[in-house]
Amino acid sequence: MTLKKLIGVGLAGLAALAVTVLLIDPSLAQTAAPAAAPAAAAPAALVINKGDNAWMMTATVLVLLMTIPGLALFYAGMVRPKNALSVLTHVFYTVCIVILIWVVYGYSLAFTGGGQIFGSLDKLFLKGVTADSQAASFSVGAPIGEYVYICFQMTFAAITPALIVGAFAERMKFSAVAIFIPLWVTLVYFPIAHMVWYWAGPDAIDAAAKALAAAGDDAAKKVAQAKLDEVMADGGFLFLKGAIDFAGGTVVHINSGIAGLVGALCVGKRVGFGKELMSPHSLVMTMIGASLLWVGWFGFNAGSNLEAVGGAPIAMINSFVATAAAALSWMFAEWIFKGKPSMLGIASGCVAGLVAVTPASGFAGPMGALVLGLVVGVVCLFFVTAVKNMFGYDDALDVFGVHCIGGIVGALGTGILVAPALGGTGIMDYTTGKIADYDFMTQMIAQSWAVCTTLVWSGVGSLIIYKAIDYTIGLRPTVEREREGLDLTDHGERAYNM
Amino acid sequence: MKIVMAIIKPFKLDEVRDALTAAGVHGLTVTEVKGYGRQKGHTEIYRGTEYAVNFLPKIKIEVAVPSEQADKVVDAITAAAKTGQIGDGKIFVYDIDHAVRIRTGETDAAAL
């Protein structure tokens, strides 16, 4: 009965989704001309660099490592023993279901041209992609294999919803999670990823700019200029606003963090929250998870350069420096204000630092990253203690306090630290092939657009999905089942048989 | 026959065992327990959230001895388990009605 209901809701959701997609982007209803997607646009003459390709395949599995077992263990250690398997299952399920959705329609919705909010369905079922297909990196004439690019982006789509489950841990039934994840990636993740990351690619812009330069008479110039304008306008909404997000501060962290907060509010507090002992059951597990997150994050940040040169080494050193700085600033702040430096504190600071450096990793200099880390460790500690206690919401594993707040600090910090005067890299202008002039206000406005759009889109989108599930199959288990623990009541097994 | 039951601090177990062996005790039963007395509980802080832990982990040991040996055993435990700090624990002594050694079927004093 429950399964039937579940399938019914799933189908209804998919139908609603199809309608939504068409409403939002009418161009999908037509047969669009082949878009100048970064992948398809790359001329066949370009040669894929074996080193770049090998690095990106490595980076891709590193991001998988972040999620399973990294994030899964990090979270599972923080819940009570009766819910450890529940959290592990949520994360593992999320990875698997998102991988399938990604190859069926996710990649196409996120990374093909079409609208500024959604892509198109041109690559539904990965139509047209072969082993020889290429995807552009951030350098002109340096593509990687499109399958590699698809897999790399797939792991991002998988980890983002997996981050959310920490907020409503220990009290959301599995059937509700099973429906929430596919709906959320479809209605929230794919459009945000498209808005921030989709663009025509360096090769298309370079080719159009060169054509303009080579154009002889005025008529030819006009045609070439129109072509360049068209290529420059082929991007996601926030990309065109000029927002920069190297590895996903908005797309991954603000996005999942706000969805987590809304989830924690919609599903309500855990039974006994604030009265009963809810201490983490294994901080050893949490430490292992945090460390695997850090290791995997090099794939996430340095891999986001899409090549093994240029921004990748910068992202690498920044992911070391900012993380260590944040881990220490959290720990020392805790030592000063709470009396003891804790393992959970240093591990939480580590994750907060990784979150904040994510959007900045390829743009800031190492000293900028150091400052960013020191700041975010204290800011996140303030949010998971003072702010959370003040408002009394039960964000069980601090998804909002660490990912959303850390993501906002990172997104805004990126706008500052990208400045060449502060040791940042500046922003590449592909029409001229040079670093563009940096203007503080322009960049901060663009960053704020990205932050606010993500907060609103994800906040509202998540709210609708949670409420829809709540009114159909319900979000919560009964109080008895919650008391007994989700491991036994949802999964029929227990984590520890001793 | 008496049972000497003592609740002690967990890290004192080895010293107590050595002292009992020296006092001629040939066997004892140990259980991990939780409880509180004057020490009450303590506070644990996880990400800034304070939890009052009301029940502290302790070790319960039970020794069955002939009645005349009971005082000696109580003294041995008291000496070995004492730190002088609050939370050192307590010792209770009570009577045994009957005892049986399962392997041989011996009873009472012979079974101890």
Image (cartoon, rainbow, N blue to C red):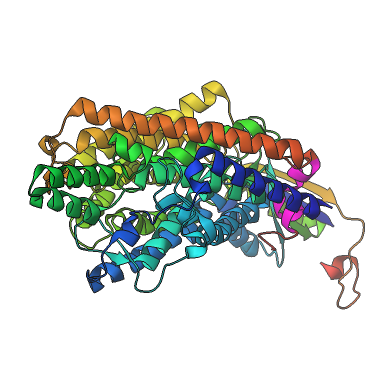
Q: Quadrant of the N terminus of chain B?
A: bottom right
Furthest residue in direction bottom, as rendered: B104
In terms of depth relative to the viewer, which is nearer, A455 or B60?
Answer: A455
Q: Would residue A294 be seen by someone viewing this image from the given angle?
A: yes
Report if residue A486 lies within the magenta region.
yes
Q: Is residue A48 above or below residue A423?
A: below
- Number of numbered labels in the structure image: 0
The residues colored magenta run A480-491
Locate residue A224, reporting x and y percent.
18, 47
B99 left or right of A264 in image: right
Residue at left 55%, top 43%?
A22
Locate residue B87, reporting x and y percent.
60, 38
Q: Quadrant of the C terminus of chain B?
A: bottom right
Residue at left 76%, top 47%?
A484
In terms of depth relative to the viewer, which is nearer, A20 or A473?
Answer: A20
Rendered image quadrant of residue A379: top left
Q: Would residue B3 be seen by someone viewing this image from the given angle?
A: no
Report if residue A422 lies within the magenta region.
no
Furthest residue in direction top, as rendered: A390
Instruction: Provide the major secondary structure of the magenta segment.
Output: helix
In terms of depth relative to the viewer, which is nearer, A140 or A99?
Answer: A140
Locate residue A271, reporting x and y percent.
71, 35
A211 left or right of B77 in image: left
A64 left or right of A17 in image: left
Rendered image quadrant of residue B50: top right
In terms of depth relative to the viewer, which is nearer, A280 or A22?
Answer: A22
Locate residue B34, reporting x and y percent.
68, 45
